[in-house]
Image (cartoon, rainbow, N blue to C red):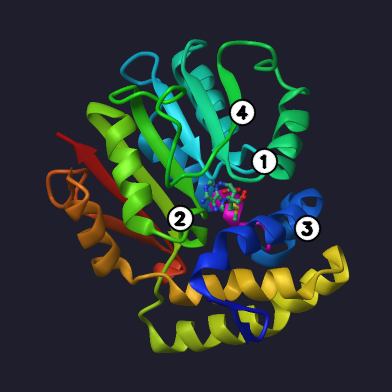
Amino acid sequence: VSFGFKEVPEESKESLVKGVFDSVASSYDLMNDASSLGVHRLWKDSYVSELKPGRKGPMRCIDVAGGTGDIALRILDHAREKYADRETSVAVVDINAQMLKEGFRRFKKTMYHNTPQISFHEANAQSLPPEVFPDNTFDLYTIAFGIRNCTSIPSVLKEAHRVLKPGGTFACLEFSRVNNPLLSMLYDQYSFTMIPLLGTILAGDRDSYQYLIESIRKFPPQPEFAKMIREAGFVTGEDVDGGAWEDMWGGIACVHKGVKL
Ligand code: SAM
């Protein structure tokens, strides 16, 4: 695992990731907008609307590595605005209390605050506490821009499989591999120069943003990640909405889906 420019051992990754998000929590939403020029909003909108929360009636959802609640808010808004559904609920789970605190503060300004539709939980995606999240509980498991920060992807997938009901959907939005060489070059240039610079200017924290970029480069490419999802017991591929994954912007981001049988 590399942090800034130094290599650090794998076992310290968890506390390191915690530190990174502690330090970026209050500026996280602003930085997301600045570094992606707002594009992360479009990706998240499209990710959530493709999942159609609420279409078949109220759903129990879990948004893991949910941070400040970007995905949870979109799920609840989609269900309400499209299907007049005020019963779909989202449990937001994150390892970092500061990120959850920002999320809680944000939800205070919404109609979901103090309703059974939203809850926040501090927990590790790799070992969700079974007393809070029993087996076969959720209809939808989402994880957006979070799985690459976890030490063990197979453990996250195993937990996702455990907490989903049979027939439940696993959906992951993550930065992925750009296959077009020209786009890939432009993207590298942009991310290795602009993002740490923006991190310094907007958040006063270059190293944390440098870590975030490097973690993107280390994440397995689309076919390899799809294989891991299948190995965790999910069905992917042609049977699930046309494919195991769907690239956004040439693979800068990508949505992987699977269904628990
Ligand atoms: N899903 C949100 C979004 O799309 O805006 C937040 C994404 S943010 C880039 C990644 C989040 O993953 C951080 O809030 C971080 O605390 C969380 N995280 C990292 N490792 C985790 C783990 N092992 N278990 C749970 N959350 C984790």
CB at mark 1 closer than 8 A to ligand 1?
yes
Q: Which residue is mark 1?
A: 68
Secondary structure under the numbered disc 3 in the rendered image? helix
Q: Position of residue 121 (x, y in %)?
A: 59, 30
Q: Earlier in the sequence, mark 4 or mark 3?
A: 3
Secondary structure under the numbered disc 4 in the rendered image? strand
Nearest to viewer (mark 1 / mark 4): 4
**Residue name at image x 38 percent, y 30 percent:** 52
Judge whether residue 44 can be spotted in this image. Answer: yes
Query: In screen coordinates, is 90 left or right of 105?
Result: left
Looking at the rendering, which quadrant does residue 227 occupy? Answer: bottom left
Relative to 47, is 75 above or below? above
What's the magenta region?
Answer: 37-42
Q: Earlier in the sequence, mark 3 or mark 1?
A: 3
Please tell me whether the stretch drawn in magenta is mainly helix, strand or loop: helix
Q: Which mark is on residue 23?
A: 3
Nearest to viewer (mark 2 / mark 1): 2
Relative to 237, is 252 above or below? below
